[in-house]
């Protein structure tokens, strides 16, 4: 088969359908349909970008199919694709919906007019070359620029005062394949993943949680996408900060409010309306944000992924885990500075607590030793426990003095075990020693000083002490009474 001669040079910024129509006008003085018919190319297959039809056209003009692939948009029943990226039909369309009157005026006669790829992107509302608004074509739902204009005069040029949005400059550079690894974060994503996420972030920040994207004007869409892109291009940390703002500005106040209330249409999009096209890393980032700021129960499906580990608690789930009723637990957590002292019930109910930090607290409460049982646990008596408690040597799980104190004083078992371990570090008392060794309590009764004071000096090593084998805790501490009394006299 002979190649068409002459043929126009391929313009990387023009759609394949626009190129084919211009070429047909030159060779047949008629539209694209005639040229396709002459070459035996199925029109509908070519319009929808099927690879076999595009390959036949490439052969007809003596070009490699690889040259036509970047300007061809593949449309099929459930979606579309462009340059190997899956896209939604509304994201980029080969149909002529809008055009730049300034561009077409410069090109002159209809045979020279080209429909740009950029004009087919839903997020593109202006011509970056002339900084003018794109104008709606008089005839809808056609892939042919000539037919879309219907022979009418070009629309009036409407200039735009604002600068070209940064996302449009990025989009144009990416279409021109002008990359030098300047932003690997964006380069790993598809065009739609970047622009759709940017638009949604910007729209919620600008218009609120219940914004309807389809009801935004082209100017509002451009503004929202530009706001979102300025955040999105900075990467996950910047996106997380934007999610902080979105969550904090949510109108949701109920304790049981869910992710839809906190994140609005962003969550709705990622949860239910983005199944056909992978939305990209924004879904994982939002899931991480939800799990970080909400007490998600293990087994819950969040944005398509089951959460297997508990990472956060609410005051309600924490109350159930600890076994303490919520009002009392609130008082305890306020005493521990885990909840602001002035927080209301609603504010407390909306707080979340890090499981990694809270689990030790939960375990401490579950295994806590009541004050009345501490003496037996540490091998002392009631008076010794109260003395050590007053001196601060034994610290309750929650202090009972001051505002917000609790009625039932308990001690963390780990704290008491650490106390016993410190005593266990004392050297054993030898059986053949000739010194006047007696229990620590006996030395205090003989005038060595207050029990808590002498005990502190023993642990600090100021008073030599030993541990009696076979005994545990305070009762195991033995000191040389004569030496202790002599030290007190010389003090």
Image: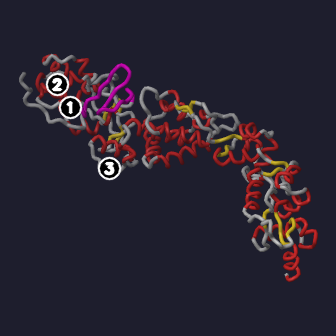
Residue 436 appears in the picture as rendered: yes
Q: Is residue 40 above or below residue 243?
A: above
Mark 3 vs mark 2: which is more N-terminal?
Answer: 2
Which structural element holds mark 2? helix
Between disc 3 and disc 1, the foreground one is: 3
Is residue 162 or residue 183 the one in the foreground? 183
Please name the residue that numbered disc 2 is placed on: 57
Which structural element holds mark 3? loop
Crowding at mark 3 (Cα within 10 Å: few <14, some 14-19, many 20+): few
Q: Quadrant of residue 117?
A: top left
Disc 1 versus disc 2: distance between alpha carbons?
A: 9 Å
| Residue 141 percent location from the top left of the image | 33, 22
| Residue 160 percent location from the top left of the image | 38, 44
Mark 1 vs mark 2: which is more N-terminal?
Answer: 2
Please name the residue that numbered disc 1 is placed on: 68
Q: Is residue 466 above or below residue 61?
A: below
Q: Which residues are magenta?
A: 69-90
Disc 3 versus disc 2: distance between alpha carbons?
A: 34 Å
In the displayed orientation, state which residue is furthest to the bottom. 490
The mark total stands at: 3
Left or right: 86 in relation to 42: right
439 in magenta? no
Quadrant for the N terminus in the image: top left
Residue 150 appears in the picture as rendered: no
Please name the residue that numbered disc 3 is placed on: 181
Q: Quadrant of residue 445?
A: bottom right
Q: Is residue 173 above or below residue 57?
A: below
| Residue 64 percent location from the top left of the image | 15, 31
Mark 3 vs mark 1: which is more N-terminal?
Answer: 1
Asked whether the residues under the numbered discs 1 and 2 touch, taking CB atoms below 8 Å apart as contact, a structural biologist would say yes
Disc 3 versus disc 1: distance between alpha carbons?
A: 25 Å
Q: Residue at x 13, y 33 (%)?
A: 8
């Amino acid at each position: 088969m002979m190649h068409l001669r002459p043929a126009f040079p391929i313009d990387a910024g023009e759609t394949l359908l626009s190129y084919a129509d211009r070429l047909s006008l030159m060779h047949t003085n008629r539209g694209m349909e005639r040229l396709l018919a002459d070459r035996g190319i199925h029109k509908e297959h070519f319009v929808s970008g099927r690879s076999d039809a595009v390959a036949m056209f490439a052969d007809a003009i003596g070009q490699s199919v690889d040259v036509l692939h970047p300007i061809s948009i593949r449309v099929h029943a459930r979606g579309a694709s462009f340059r190997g990226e899956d896209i939604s039909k509304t994201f980029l369309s080969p149909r002529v919906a809008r055009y730049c009157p300034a561009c077409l005026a410069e090109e002159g006669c209809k045979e020279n007019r080209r429909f740009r790829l950029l004009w087919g992107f839903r997020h593109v509302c202006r011509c970056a070359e002339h900084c003018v608004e794109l104008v709606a074509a008089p005839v809808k739902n056609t892939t042919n620029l000539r037919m879309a204009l219907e022979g009418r005069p070009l629309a009036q040029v409407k200039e735009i005062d604002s600068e070209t949005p940064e996302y449009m400059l990025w989009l144009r550079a990416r279409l021109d394949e002008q990359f030098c690894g300047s932003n690997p974060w964006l380069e790993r994503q598809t065009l739609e993943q970047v622009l759709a996420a940017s638009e949604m972030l910007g729209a919620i920040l600008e218009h609120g949680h219940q914004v309807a994207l389809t009801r935004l004007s082209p100017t509002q869409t451009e503004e929202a996408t530009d706001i979102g892109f300025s955040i999105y291009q900075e990467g996950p940390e910047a996106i997380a900060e934007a999610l902080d703002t979105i969550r904090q500005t949510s109108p949701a106040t109920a304790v049981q409010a869910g992710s839809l209330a906190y994140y609005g249409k962003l969550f709705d999009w990622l949860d239910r309306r983005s199944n056909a096209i992978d939305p990209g890393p924004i879904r994982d980032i939002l899931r991480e944000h939800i799990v970080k700021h909400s007490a998600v129960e293990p087994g819950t499906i969040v944005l398509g992924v089951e959460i297997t580990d508990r990472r956060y608690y609410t005051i309600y789930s924490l109350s159930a885990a600890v076994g303490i009723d919520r009002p009392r637990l609130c008082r305890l957590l306020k005493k521990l500075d885990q909840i602001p002292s002035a927080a209301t019930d609603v504010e407390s109910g909306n707080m979340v607590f890090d499981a990694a930090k809270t689990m030790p607290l939960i375990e401490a409460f579950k295994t806590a030793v009541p004050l009345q049982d501490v003496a037996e646990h540490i091998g002392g008596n009631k008076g010794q426990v109260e003395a050590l408690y007053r001196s601060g040597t034994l610290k309750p799980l929650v202090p009972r003095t001051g505002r917000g104190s609790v009625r039932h004083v308990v001690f963390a078992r780990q704290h008491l075990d650490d106390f016993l371990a410190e005593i266990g570090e004392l050297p054993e008392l030898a059986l053949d020693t000739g010194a006047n060794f007696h229990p620590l309590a006996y030395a205090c009764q003989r005038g060595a000083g207050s029990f808590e004071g002498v005990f502190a000096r023993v642990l600090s090593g100021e008073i030599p002490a030993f541990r009696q084998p076979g005994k545990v805790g305070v009762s195991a501490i033995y000191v040389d009474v004569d030496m202790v009394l002599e030290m007190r006299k010389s003090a």
